[in-house]
Image (cartoon, rainbow, N blue to C red):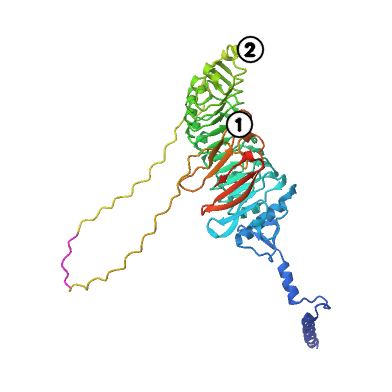
């Protein structure tokens, strides 16, 4: 009997469910008065409003990064760019000028400070190629989602209030050509992720709070410009320093120690080096005379000793020479003051004892606080006697000896094919075969690859961010400068048309930069070539920038 009652209850339960289902279905036609029933339209609307969270290939999910499926993107890469830019917008705590105010909707190419271009590998689609938030007074941090901008060639955020560290996901920015993080509040160790960016040519980390050592691998990387001044880096310059192919390197205002590396003499493409205000303690290596393209050499405010090398008189391109505030001694070589392009020679606050008369003919020089007889404003006789009574032995610094770089070996010659001797064959025992059927002619060989002509030789004059022009004194001519020399393995170059001036005041790239704004950007070549025209706020900063 009990079993029978259970069967009845089971059937009653199913009948009740069937009744509720019929009631639910009939309510679709009266959705306004239904109690909890959903029409097909309502269900579809809810599905459309559901937010899809971004996950990258490693399964990481971006914090609060969502994409409304109702947004229609021109291509998947613009969808990724939307995610990255929305993540950046959410990571911004203060946007004084509301630069990200119009970062809304699917058309990321219309966002302020975002520049699109045809994709390097597919010119039929447009992708985000550049971001320029320079001088935006923006406070925030850089989110990991920026790694989604895989076509990004230029990232400029100088003169803001970004803090934190450089995201590890920057490792995905394989086409990143210029990285300018200068004049912010980034901290921590040197961002080693930049060493893994294969296309990077311009690195600007100055005016931040980075600390610790600088990886020696930085000087093996194929960069053209390195700015790491005004941080808290503390280390000895490594022996591979001279491996760097840079045309400009600025290390000023850190805590470097040890020797000025003699390998400096291998940097034959170097045009500007500034190592002022560090803790360098050695003699100046004679190999500095190998730098025939050098225009600016500044090692002031260190602890350098010994003589000024005669080899500096071979630097025929040198315009600015500053060795002030060291402990150098001996006589100034006349060949230095006779350099054809030298316009500013500062050697004050040393212990030099001789100055040839030709130095007095220089346009600008400073010889104060030395031990020069018959010159004004010199050190006291007691100071000079005390210091000069202790001769300097340059070998005592135990600096590494100079090892010249070896040229790359030529590629091996292809082996010359040797024809095998003819082999006599026995006469055929069978009747001769029918005449052979002529095979179709081979397909025409493809046209030879087109090589782009190289640009003129590189010439950089310390471009501050992004990278701004060098300003010294309000006179002198404009020059066409080449940053980022053309290498045979990639067709990339940058031209700068700068109105710049000579070094009589503190280096402009050691000061906070002037604002520059990109207003046009597009690719020229499948290998992420692009054009950026910087529109300055002041006409005398006019520049043209081509990558």
Quadrant assignment, res 165: top right
Query: What's the distance in space between the residues labelled 1 and 2, CA to CA?
Result: 37 Å
The answer to whether one can see residue 173 in this image is yes
As helix, strand or loop, the secondary structure at mark 1 comes to loop
User: Which of these two is toward me, 301 or 537?
Assistant: 537
User: Which of these two is toward me, 75 or 402?
Assistant: 75
User: Which of these two is toward me, 421 or 478?
Assistant: 478
Q: What is the x, y in percent for residue 40?
A: 73, 76
Q: Nearer the viewer, mark 1 or mark 2?
A: 1
As helix, strand or loop, the secondary structure at mark 2 comes to loop
Q: Is residue 235 magenta?
A: no
Quadrant assignment, res 259: top right
Q: What is the x, y in percent for residue 542?
A: 61, 41
Q: What is the x, y in percent for residue 272?
A: 55, 33
Q: Is residue 470 above or below residue 441?
A: above
Residue at coordinates 65% horizontally, 59% vertically from top-left?
55
- Tell me the residue that label 1 is attached to: 475
Q: Is residue 428 magenta?
A: yes
User: Which of these two is toward me, 76 or 360?
Assistant: 360
Q: Main secondary structure of the magenta part?
A: loop
Upstream in the sequence, badge 1 or badge 2? 2
CB within 8 Å, label 1 to label 2: no
Q: What is the x, y in percent for residue 16?
A: 80, 83
Residues packed near mark 1 inside 10 Å, few (<14), some (14 to 19) or many (20 plus)? few
The answer to whether one can see residue 237 in this image is no
Q: Is residue 452 above or below residue 15?
A: above
Quadrant assignment, res 448: bottom left
What is the quadrant of the N terminus in the image?
bottom right
Q: Which mark is residue 380?
A: 2
From which residue to which does the magenta span run?
423-430
């Amino acid at each position: 009997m009990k079993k029978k009652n259970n069967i009845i209850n089971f059937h009653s339960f199913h009948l009740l469910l069937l009744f509720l289902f019929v009631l639910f279905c009939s309510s679709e036609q009266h959705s306004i008065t239904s109690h909890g029933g959903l029409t097909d339209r309502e269900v579809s609307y809810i599905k459309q409003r559901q937010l899809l969270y971004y996950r990258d290939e490693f399964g990481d999910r971006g914090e609060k990064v969502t994409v409304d499926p109702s947004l229609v993107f021109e291509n998947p890469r613009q969808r990724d760019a939307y995610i990255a830019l929305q993540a950046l917008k959410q990571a911004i705590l203060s946007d004084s000028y509301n630069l990200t105010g119009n970062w809304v909707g699917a058309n990321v190419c219309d966002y302020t400070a975002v520049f699109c271009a045809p994709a390097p590998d597919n010119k039929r689609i447009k992708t985000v190629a550049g971001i320029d938030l320079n001088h935006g007074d923006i406070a925030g941090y850089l989110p990991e989602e920026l790694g989604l901008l895989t076509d990004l060639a230029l990232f400029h955020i100088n003169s803001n209030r970004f803090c934190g560290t450089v995201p590890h996901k920057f490792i995905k920015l394989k086409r990143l050509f210029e990285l300018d993080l200068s004049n912010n509040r980034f901290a921590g160790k040197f961002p080693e992720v930049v060493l893994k960016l294969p296309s990077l040519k311009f690195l600007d980390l100055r005016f931040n709070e980075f600390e610790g050592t600088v990886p020696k691998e930085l000087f093996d990387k194929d960069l053209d410009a390195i700015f790491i001044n005004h941080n808290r880096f503390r280390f000895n310059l490594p022996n591979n320093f001279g491996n760097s192919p840079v045309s400009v390197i600025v290390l000023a205002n850190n805590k470097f120690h040890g020797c000025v590396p003699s390998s400096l003499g291998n940097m034959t493409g170097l045009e500007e080096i500034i190592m002022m205000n560090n803790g360098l303690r050695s003699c100046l290596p004679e190999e500095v005379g190998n730098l025939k393209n050098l225009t600016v050499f500044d090692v002031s405010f260190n602890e350098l000793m010994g003589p000024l090398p005669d080899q500096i008189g071979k630097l025929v391109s040198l315009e600015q020479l500053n060795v002030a505030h060291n402990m150098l001694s001996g006589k100034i070589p006349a060949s230095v003051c006779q350099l054809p392009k030298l316009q500013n020679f500062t050697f004050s606050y040393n212990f030099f004892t001789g100055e040839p008369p030709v130095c007095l003919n220089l346009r600008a020089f400073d010889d104060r606080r030395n031990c020069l007889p018959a010159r004004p404003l010199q050190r006291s006789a007691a100071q000079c006697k005390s210091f000069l009574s202790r001769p300097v032995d340059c070998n005592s610094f135990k600096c590494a000896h100079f090892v010249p770089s070896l040229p790359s070996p030529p590629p091996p010659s292809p082996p010359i094919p040797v024809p095998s001797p003819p082999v006599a064959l026995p006469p055929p025992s069978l009747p001769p075969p029918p005449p052979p059927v002529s095979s179709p002619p081979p397909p025409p060989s493809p046209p030879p690859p087109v090589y782009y002509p190289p640009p003129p030789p590189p010439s950089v004059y310390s471009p501050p961010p992004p990278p701004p022009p060098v300003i010294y004194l309000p006179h002198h001519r404009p020059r066409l400068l080449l940053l980022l020399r053309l290498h045979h393995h990639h067709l990339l170059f940058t031209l700068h048309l700068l109105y710049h001036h000579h070094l009589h005041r503190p280096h402009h790239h050691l000061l906070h930069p002037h604002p520059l704004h990109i207003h046009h950007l597009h690719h020229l070549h499948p290998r992420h070539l692009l054009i950026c025209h910087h529109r300055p706020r002041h006409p005398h900063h006019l520049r043209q920038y081509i990558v």
